[in-house]
Amino acid sequence: MRNERLHQILQSNYFAPLCFLIAAFLRFAWVIINNPYPAIDEYVYFQTGINIANGLGYVHEGVPTTIFPVGYPAFLGLIFSLFGVSVQVAKIANVLLSLGTLYFFYRITQRLFSALIVARIALFLLSIFPDQIFYNALLMTEPLFLFLLMLGIFLAASSDFIKFRHIFATSIIFALCCYVKSQIFFIPALCLFWRVIIKQCTKRTAFKQLIIMYSIIFAMTLPWTVRNFQLNKPAFISGNGPANLVIGNNPTATGTFYLLDNKIWQSIGRSSKVKYVLRWVSAYPQDYLVLLLKKMYFLYLIPEADPLIDLERCTLPQSFSIQEADAIVKNIKERIGAEACIPMGFDNCNELFLQSIIWNEQTRKYSIDPELNDQQKSYFIQLLVFSSNVEHKVKVNSFWHLIWLCSRYAVLVLFVLYIFMIFSSKIIKTKSPSPPGTSVLAMLIVFYFTCIYLVFFGSARFSFPIFPFMIMYVAFLLGNSVGTKESDQ
């Protein structure tokens, strides 16, 4: 009786709209409640986005850069040129992207699993999944990247993919996605491989489509690659790949991001970073295998890049005492140097600090000047972080942190359970529900991104685009407990 009632709820015409309303409420509420300002990586995205909006191009601290892929700064530049420079506007854009991701995720799940019940369970799970909510309050690439990835896969998995205009549109989306994160470069080939193995097209047709897609992708990304080479910074989209490769693969590597000892950089010198890594891996294969396990550990199990930590770290302090104010100025001078304040138009850090705070006679404490604009506040919090004035004060809300961890571990456990059930059914011939062959695309994408990040290093942030595809299989497991129904696509 209970299963029948649940089945009716999932089949209701109101279920999907309700999921979207819940998702919108949770995301908008989160970005309103949490008000961090961009720091560290986010600061670079924010400031370069402002520079693009002002017509200065992709420059950082006055110099053309390849520090990060240009896609997200360009997106912020477009937003800022239309609506003005505002952190809150960028967060609202993140929420809209997240809701778009949810829609295409729902449609992809329907396509891959051919079951309306599975798609709706997956939709509900992703609507409330904390990862998909927390990152909306941060100015990071994740919401835009996942939106473009889902849109590209939705188009590539469509039955209309045989039409040239459809292939052309899909190629453009994947090219734009490359500008945000070039790790997706082989996803188009993976989608075509999937179409071949499920007999949606022949190998010959898939090869022709492959040539067309990558011709368009190269045509769209070539101008940026040429620009990078002209700057004497040879890179396909961004120049941080080789450095990240070394950080993730060297004698002192931890399995995740860390500040690499200068001695290793000096030992590499001007030689190829790729060759250095290959030499180290071939010389110490056992160490490398252990390192791979550590990378998996940080990618899925340990929240090294916790979005909640970024929220806490990047939130401006409400007030601070005279002693704390003196320590801030001292640390900024010692750790960064007085010249670090010049890009904001101040002669020195003392002037920046005095212009950024107000003395409150009643509380006998300083507080941030509310008249500062978002760019000034962002620059100020960046100085606080890099001068180590707020790093040691980070205390993550234990409730939200527990929710975040439990949700990730629950999906991981159920996903591993699904894999175990499939393998056990093949080996000992047990009867267990098997998804349709089309669902293999989701598993291919999980495997693809896992392998990509094992090449570099592990981080909880990197698993952001992986968990939605795991959730599809979790929904399949849960869906079989209530019964599934073929979707009317």
Image (tube, rainbow, N blue to C red):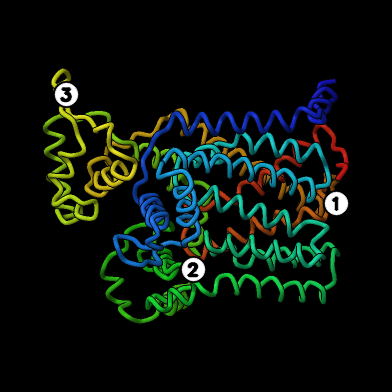
| Disc number lying in front (3 or 2) | 3
Relative image position of residue 381 (x, y in whole percent): 28, 43
| 216 w.r.t. 160: above or below | below
Tag 1: Cα neighbours inside 10 Å, few (<14), some, or many (≥20)?
A: few
Inspect the image, locate mark 3, and give the three-letter code of the amino acid beneath it. Asn
Q: Quadrant of the N terminus?
A: top right
- Whichever of callouts 1 and 2 sits on the residue coming sooner in the sequence is 2
Q: Nearer the viewer, residue 163 or 135?
A: 163
- Which residue is under mark 2? 237
Spatial distance from mark 3 to mark 2, Cα to Cα? 48 Å
Quadrant of residue 253 within the rendered picture: bottom left
Residue hosting label 3: 360
Residue at coordinates 47% horizontally, 77% vertically from top-left?
226
Q: Is residue 93 left or right of residue 33?
A: right
| Circles 3 and 2 in contact, beta carbons < 8 Å | no
Given the image, on which type of amino acid does mark 2 rest? Ile
Q: Could you tell me which residue is drawn at 15 percent across and 36 percent down?
A: 325
Marks 3 and 1, how far apart in space? 74 Å
Nearest the camera: 51 or 253?
51
Type of residue at label 1?
Lys
- Residue 62 is left or right of residue 287, and the answer is left
Q: Is residue 140 above or below residue 123?
A: below
Q: Residues within 10 Å of mark 3 (few under 14, many from 20)?
A: few
Is the C terminus in the top left, top right, bottom left or bottom right quadrant?
top right
Q: Nearer the viewer, mark 3 or mark 1?
A: 3
Relative image position of residue 383 (x, y in whole percent): 24, 47
- What residue would you read off at disc 1? 429
